Structures are given as C-alpha cells and as structure tokens.
C-alpha cells in the first residue's frame, strides 16, 4: 500500500502539482511546419506553446529544462493503435457502428508509459478489424498517471470510426459464421446496405422533422451513427490492404458524398496512389510489415515514400504496443526505402497523422498556440542512435529518462513483488493486432 | 526477313520476354572484383582505407594497395566496406506467409524430433531472401522451433538455388527449455500448475536423455569393436554430436528462473551449449558469464517481458550481458523482416552495447558461436567473400547499400519490393480521366 501511494505521489508531483509551465532552453527545434531553429527556446504556459524564440527570459513558476545538444520536436502521434483498451473487437455483427472503444479505456495500461518513453504523446485507440463497420475509436492523450479513463480522452478531438476490408471481416463472418461477407463482393454490398439504411433513416427523421410523417421513426444508434458518417461528422479510418478493395470503398463513399477517409495499413496503397490523391484520401501505413498473411504478400517498404511522392498525405502507424515505442525509427525507414527528406519523414509521425485525426490545429508541430506536447531527443530522431530523453504532454513531464523509475506500474499485485514473465509478448504472427481476441472468441462462439 | 526467320524471331521474342518475367530478380554475376580505396571495416583488425580483392568466391587479398590486373575495379572512394551481417536466429526460408500454415515449415509435430532438418525444407526461392540481403544481411541461422527438441537448424548464405549452394556447413540442434513463463495474456494457469508443468517437462527430457546416453554408449562400443549394430533411430543419431561434445546444443530459454535451471541442467549433463532468447539475461548476466556459455538474443526491438520491467529492458539486454563478459550474438527471430537485423544491432549499440561490440554481435561472434569463424564474420584474407559496400554506417536507418557480394557473386540490388517500387512510383497509365 505504501508503495502504491508512493507511486501515485511520484506521478502527482511530477504531474499535476507541478505547473504546466515549462521553458525548454537552447534546443535544436524541429518545428515541422516552420523549419529547424537552432539554439532556440520553447516556452509552454498553462499547457500551451506560448513562445518560440532565442533567449526567452524565464517567467515565474516555470520549470526550466536545459535542452543544449538535444533535439526538440512535437509529440509523436500514432494514427493507429490499440493500447489503453480493455476490449478491441465487437465480433457479433458485420456492422457495429454504435459501439465505442471510448467506453473501455484503461488508464493503467503500462503500454501508455512505454509509448511515452518512445516520444508518443497521442494515439488513436481504435476498434479492431473484425467487422466491415466496427466501432467508434478514441483519440487519446498519453497522460499516464491519471486514473480516470475520461482524462485520457483528447478533448475536442473529432469522432472517428473503424471500417475494415479484406481477410479479417471475411474470416470472422464468412468463414467463422457462414454469413455475408464471405468474399470481397460481399464486402462491397455490406457497406452499400449499411449506407443505404443510414440514408433512409436520415430521410425518415428529416421527413418527421418537416412534419411530412406524423409518427417519429424508431431511434437506432447504429443507424444514427451511419447518418453521422454520411453527414461527414465522423472521420472514417479503414483497415485495408489490397488495391481493388481500396478503389471499391472510394466508389461507395463517392456515391454517398463522403469525402474524408483515411486508409489504414493500406499495404497496396502504392498501387493506386494517383486515385487516392485524386479523391483526397489519406494513408496511414506500416513502415515495413508484410507477408504475415496473403493480402500483404505483394507489399513493398517503399509504400510510404511512393504515396508521399504521389501527393497522398501519409503517416506511419504502429498498430502494436512494441512498434509504437519507436515510430521515429519507423519513419526513418522511408529514408532507406525511397529517400524521403528529414522534413518529409518527420511529417509522417507528426503533422500528417494529426491531419488524419482532425487535430492538426491543436498538435503535430511546434507552433505558438498549439498544445504543449513536446519530445526531447538525444541525437536526431531519425538516427538509429536517437534516444528520447523527455516527453511532455500539455506542459506536464510524463516521461523523463533522468527520473525514470524502474517500476512504473499504477496497478500492483498485493501478493507478488514482480509481474508475471511472458514468453510471448507479441500477438500471434498469424493475426495483426486488429484481430485481437479473435481466436478466443471463436472458441467460445463455436462451443455455444 | 523471310517467313521462317520471322517465326524464329517471334518465338525468340516470346521466349526472352517470358524468361525475363519468370525470374524474380536479375541474375547474379560471378567474377574477380577489386574494391578500390574503400574504408574497410574488418571487425578483427580495425578500420583502414584500402583495397579488397574478391576472387573464386573468397576474399583473395586485402591491404593498403592490392594489384589485380584482370579484376573488375569498383571504386569505393568515400564508401564503407563491411563483412556480411549474420542473423543468429531466423525462420527465413522456412516461413513464407504467416497466416498460411501450409507455407510454414518451422514447427514439426512431436516433442523429440531433433533430426528434422531445416536445410531440406528451406526454400531457396523465398521472396523474403532477396528482400533480406539488400540490407547487408548475407547469412542467417534458419531454425525450427516446435516441440522440445525441435530439429536441426542450418546456417545459410542468402544466395544459391540448392541447399548445397546455400549451406555454410554448420547445422545445429535446437531445444526449447521447459518454461515457467506465461504463454500470453490469455494463459490463466495457476502458478503451481505452471511450476509442475515445467518440472514434468524436464523430467521427460531427463528420461529421454538417459536413452540418448544409452544409445551413445552402445554406438561407441560398437564403433570401438568395429561391429555393426541395428541402429535405425535418426532422432538419437542427431543427438550424438551433442552428448559427445562435438557440437553445442542450442537452447531457447528466457526467464531468470528458467535460465538458472538451464545452466544447472547443462552442467549436470556435461555438454556444450548456447543459450537463445535469454530475455532475462541482464538479471543473471554474471552467472551466464561464469558458465562461459555464449548467448544469442533478440529481437532487440521487443517489449519487456514483465510489466514491472524497465521500458528499455529489451534494448539494453544485449549490452548488459556483453558488459558482464558474455559472448553475445543478435538475432531477429523473424522471417520476412529479418532485414531489420542492422536496426536491432543499432538499438543495442545505442542502449549501452556500443557500435563496435554490436557489430561483432552480428558478425564474428555469431560466426564463432556456429563454428564457422574460419570462413565467416570478418574481412580477412581467405574468408568467404560476403561483403557489402555502403555510403555510411550500416546500422544507420538512412544508409544505402550500394554493392553486395555473396560468396563472391555480385548480387543485383533487386527484390520484389524494389521491383514493385520501380513499377509503381510513377505508374503508367496514371489516373484515368
């Protein structure tokens, strides 16, 4: 008990009791949107970036951090992750637009701290890819130390929803339950049916509001969500791999006038980069994951650079509690595979994912008025020898290599000193994290 | 052109185009190559600017200046020359597509199958092989991992069309030591059950071991007396080099408690051994060093195994063991992304191991552990010409590999991934109007 209190106290003192005022002195500031500024100070006041200049005079009640010889960049943003979630997939139906992962946030997940130690301040906690239209996702800030799940949510971030194409929904529903979709033909019709129903629902309510019908339609959260998607109030993030299915979904969306779509994984995005660019669709990709299943066998690690050079706004994501810890390294792989510039590569993990999540006015670059989400690196973040030194969220130091305790668990077993040792920390090679829980669910489902 | 000539021309054209499309990448070229004036990172004799001659598949000469009138000269001024990197543990060639079990050959059924031979199942034409070698990884230990005695892994060069052409002449038996760790978040066995499961597994191993020793004695006696005996047990045969201390046993073991048990077990069986995995190695580095047992660890880019471990436990593990005096080699333990070996080494270097030691952990240390350091693991006269040329530090993410030689063959810098890039970077036709 003493230990738990101590840990909570540690986080309180490094967190809330400290002011959200920080002056970062003399760093090499990689602003992302306004070039590189040498020997420059960044002042964060009340959690927001207040000033970027040389020789800023230290205001009162402000913690000063010496960043001499260090690189200062905006907090890294992961547009695809499943950390801090107690559940990922609502397997029950091909369309489950009504469920929200925001209801199952877990602030105790150690993965949040480990992501912070990799400079990641924001992640997009996503529903899984079991369903064609899965649940709504949640953009979270990595405020590790808070215990109220609501405090993880990034206030004001737009609503997002997970779509999924290809093998995963087909495995779960077609192969697993013998219902449509069992093919990529069925995938298209599943989307068309859901959009048609949503549109009809919208029209019924419009008719009711105009007095054209007397009785109100039955309220339905699933269809309400579909209507919000059609209205453009929810951003779509679609798990996808193959070029043909990417084109298919863009045709469906075009028919319903839905413009905003970010394709996730999108391993074959490079094959239809001109079409993605023309539609204004964006892409959030792995740096180099491939061959873990057939639909990613014809991939290339040049995907991100080909997309970028074709004018598609692209980000590098993790989808994984390990990969999320070194997105700066994953972004650098676009320099080996495709020769992107430092600026282009850094955008893949900052301002571009911010755009895809609709939060680029708040985060993704070091600019006055933006959130005080900042990372300090020893060595350039794109170097293999880069080591994150400090990660600041809303002006609060949430990770510091100098003050990093050996044990940062917030939830501790009363009987065991150490947590269990895991032989397998990774999900099975056969599944991406998006299908987490599938094997267990299938076993239970089949035994019923 | 008369009619018959025309037909021959068309036939030739069809043949040549289909031939071009039929191959994965361009053909490698054999020859005599003189790498002039490059920065030679020898691993064993420091780094200096000089020349390196590749002839008949080996490094024929190396020095400040080498003269070879008949060689194709490759100017390496301002470039860096390294020995091929060796991955000390991979599934390359044994696994093609993760989710398609019929394309995976690394886990045979049965607990005692040490005679299952990876070299027979490795697919020389795996699409992942060219992908891997383009990052300077020229050689891997491709290993089975099922059961308890999983099979015999093979060290292979990443160029060749038959097992004989790829083999580096080192095949090693792999064992999975009984584990007291959890198999995943879903593993809800009680602590007492986990313990008794592992104890029972070790008991079974010891029973099998008694049979192996018996088999070895009969065989030794028969050999000494020059009598023939009715030996038809390939599994037992595979274990003879281990009990006779001709080869080390390669033991996968990860948690502190299991490593300690394994060290005692190795001592009690009086065999040579190499530990693989060794995720908790930093907790018992001194004991491993004292036992003088080498370690193959990795991937470096992986999660800590306990929630209360430091976030960088896996990053620092290799370096902590090396500092304690353990001979450490690094592996990816991957298949299709074995190409990330230099990045695993780079992270280990950044997190305490240092660049020099990390380079050894993917070259000479690995060669020594597999008993092939007379031919592999450094730039040295007489060694196999696995050599690559870069524009910088091979661990640095943005570094480009500019030339690659495996067994003296000039390997085209192509893989399906680069060919897809060539086809789609500026796709034609582009956007339809």
Image: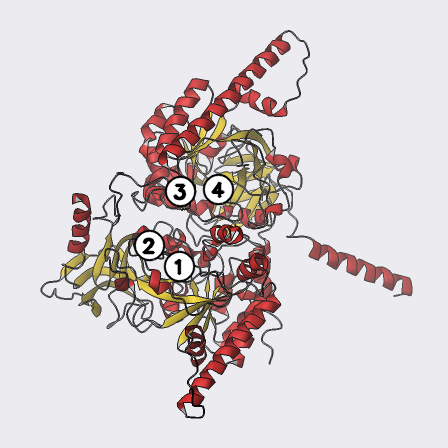
Same chain check for tags 2 and 3: no
Q: Which residue is mark 1?
A: A81
Q: Chain of mark 4?
A: B
Q: Are marks 1 and 2 in contact (CB under 8 Å)?
A: yes
On the question of residue B294 being in view, the answer is no
Report how far apart the C-alphas of labels 2 and 4 lie in the structure.
23 Å
Q: Chain of mark 2?
A: A
User: How would you rate the neighbour count of disc 1 (Cα within 10 Å): few for under 14, some for 14-19, many for 20 or more?
Assistant: many
Q: Which residue is mark 2?
A: A115
Q: Secondary structure at mark 4?
A: loop
Same chain check for tags 2 and 4: no
What's the mark number on residue B333?
A: 4
Report how far apart the C-alphas of labels 2 and 3 lie in the structure.
26 Å
Q: Which residue is mark 3?
A: B188
Question: Picture coordinates of residue B214 (x, y %)?
Answer: 56, 14
Report how far apart the C-alphas of labels 3 and 4 lie in the structure.
26 Å
Question: Picture coordinates of residue A170 (x, y %)?
Answer: 56, 61
Residues A173 and A376: in front is A173
Quarter of the image where one finds residue B55: top right
Same chain check for tags 1 and 2: yes
Question: Picture coordinates of residue A163 (x, y %)?
Answer: 48, 67
Instruction: Answer above or below: position of A147 versus A192.
Output: above
Report how far apart the C-alphas of labels 4 and 1 lie in the structure.
23 Å
């Amino acid at each position: 008990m003493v230990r738990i209190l101590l840990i909570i106290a540690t986080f309180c003192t490094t967190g809330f009791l400290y002011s959200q005022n920080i002056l970062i002195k003399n760093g090499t500031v990689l602003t992302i949107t306004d070039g590189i500024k040498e020997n420059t100070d960044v002042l964060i006041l009340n959690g927001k970036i207040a000033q970027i200049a040389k020789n800023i005079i230290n205001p009162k009640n402000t913690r000063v951090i010496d960043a001499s010889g260090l690189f200062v960049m905006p907090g890294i943003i992961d547009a695809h992750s499943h950390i801090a979630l107690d559940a990922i997939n609502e397997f029950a139906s091909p369309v489950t637009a009504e469920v929200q992962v925001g209801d199952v946030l877990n602030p105790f997940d150690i993965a949040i701290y480990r992501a912070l130690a990799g400079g990641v301040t924001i992640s997009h906690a996503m529903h899984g890819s079991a369903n064609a239209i899965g649940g709504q996702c949640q953009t979270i800030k990595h405020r590790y130390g808070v215990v109220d799940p609501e405090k993880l949510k990034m206030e004001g971030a737009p609503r997002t929803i997970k779509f999924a194409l290809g093998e995963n929904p087909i495995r779960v529903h077609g192969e697993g339950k013998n219902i449509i979709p069992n093919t990529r033909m069925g995938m298209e019709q599943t989307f068309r049916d859901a959009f048609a129903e949503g549109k009809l629902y919208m029209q019924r309510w419009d008719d009711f509001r105009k007095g054209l019908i007397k009785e109100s339609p039955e309220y339905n959260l699933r269809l309400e969500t579909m209507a919000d998607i059609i209205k453009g109030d929810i951003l779509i993030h679609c798990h996808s791999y193959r070029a043909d299915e990417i084109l298919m979904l863009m045709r469906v969306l075009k028919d319903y006038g839905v413009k905003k779509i970010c394709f996730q994984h999108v391993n074959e995005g490079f094959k239809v980069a001109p079409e993605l660019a023309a539609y204004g669709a964006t892409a959030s990709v792995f740096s180099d994951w491939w061959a873990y299943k057939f639909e990613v066998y014809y991939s290339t690690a040049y995907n991100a650079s080909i997309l970028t050079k074709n004018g598609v706004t692209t980000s590098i994501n993790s989808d994984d509690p390990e990969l999320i810890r070194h997105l700066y390294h994953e972004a650098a792989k676009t320099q080996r595979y495709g020769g992107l510039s430092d600026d282009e590569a850094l955008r893949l993990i900052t301002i571009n994912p911010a755009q895809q999540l609709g939060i680029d006015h708040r985060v993704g670059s070091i600019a006055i008025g933006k959130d005080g989400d900042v990372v300090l690196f020893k060595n350039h973040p794109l170097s293999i020898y880069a080591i994150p030194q400090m990660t600041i969220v809303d002006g609060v130091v949430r990770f510091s290599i100098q003050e990093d305790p050996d044990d940062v668990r917030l939830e501790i077993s009363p009987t065991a000193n150490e947590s269990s040792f895991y032989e397998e920390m990774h999900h099975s090679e056969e599944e991406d994290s998006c299908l987490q829980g599938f094997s267990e669910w299938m076993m239970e489902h089949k035994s019923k | 052109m008369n009619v018959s000539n025309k037909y021959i021309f068309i036939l030739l054209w069809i043949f040549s185009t289909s031939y071009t499309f039929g191959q994965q990448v361009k053909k490698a070229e054999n020859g005599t190559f003189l790498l002039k004036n490059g920065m030679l990172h020898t691993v064993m004799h420091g780094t200096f600017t000089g020349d390196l001659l590749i002839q008949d598949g080996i490094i024929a000469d190396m020095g400040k200046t080498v003269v070879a009138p008949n060689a194709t000269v490759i100017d390496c001024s301002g470039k860096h020359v390294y020995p091929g990197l060796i991955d000390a543990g991979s599934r390359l060639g044994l696994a093609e597509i993760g989710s398609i079990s019929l394309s995976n050959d690394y886990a045979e059924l049965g607990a005692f199958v040490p005679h299952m031979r990876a070299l027979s199942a490795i697919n020389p034409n795996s699409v992942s092989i060219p992908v891997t070698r383009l990052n300077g990884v020229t050689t891997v230990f491709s290993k089975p991992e099922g059961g308890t005695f999983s099979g015999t892994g093979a060290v292979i060069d990443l160029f060749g069309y038959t097992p004989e052409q790829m083999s580096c002449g080192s095949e090693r038996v792999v064992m999975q030591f009984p584990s007291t760790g959890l198999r995943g978040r879903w593993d809800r066995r009680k602590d007492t059950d986990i313990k008794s499961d592992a104890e029972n597994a070790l008991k079974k191993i010891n029973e099998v071991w008694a049979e192996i020793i018996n088999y070895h004695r009969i065989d030794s006696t028969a050999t000494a007396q020059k009598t023939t005996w009715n030996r038809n047990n390939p599994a037992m045969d595979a274990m003879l080099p281990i009990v006779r201390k001709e080869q080390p046993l390669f033991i996968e073991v990860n948690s502190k408690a299991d490593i300690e048990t394994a060290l005692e077990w190795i001592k009690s069986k009086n065999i040579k051994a190499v530990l693989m995995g060794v995720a908790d190695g930093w907790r018992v580095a001194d004991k491993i060093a004292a036992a003088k047992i080498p370690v193959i660890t990795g991937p470096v880019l992986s999660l800590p195994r306990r929630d209360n471990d430091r976030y960088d436990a896996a990053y620092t593990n290799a370096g902590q063991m090396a500092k304690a005096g353990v001979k450490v080699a690094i592996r990816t333990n991957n298949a299709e992304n074995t190409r990330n070996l230099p990045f695993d080494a780079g992270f280990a270097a950044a997190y305490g191991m240092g660049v020099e030691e990390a380079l050894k952990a993917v070259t000479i240390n690995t060669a020594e552990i597999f008993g092939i350091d007379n031919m592999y693991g450094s730039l040295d006269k007489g060694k196999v010409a696995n050599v690559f040329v870069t524009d910088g530090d091979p661990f640095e993410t943005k570094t480009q590999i500019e030339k690659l030689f495996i067994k003296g063959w000039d390997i085209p810098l192509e893989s399906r991934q680069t060919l897809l890039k060539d086809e789609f970077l500026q796709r034609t036709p582009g956007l339809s109007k």
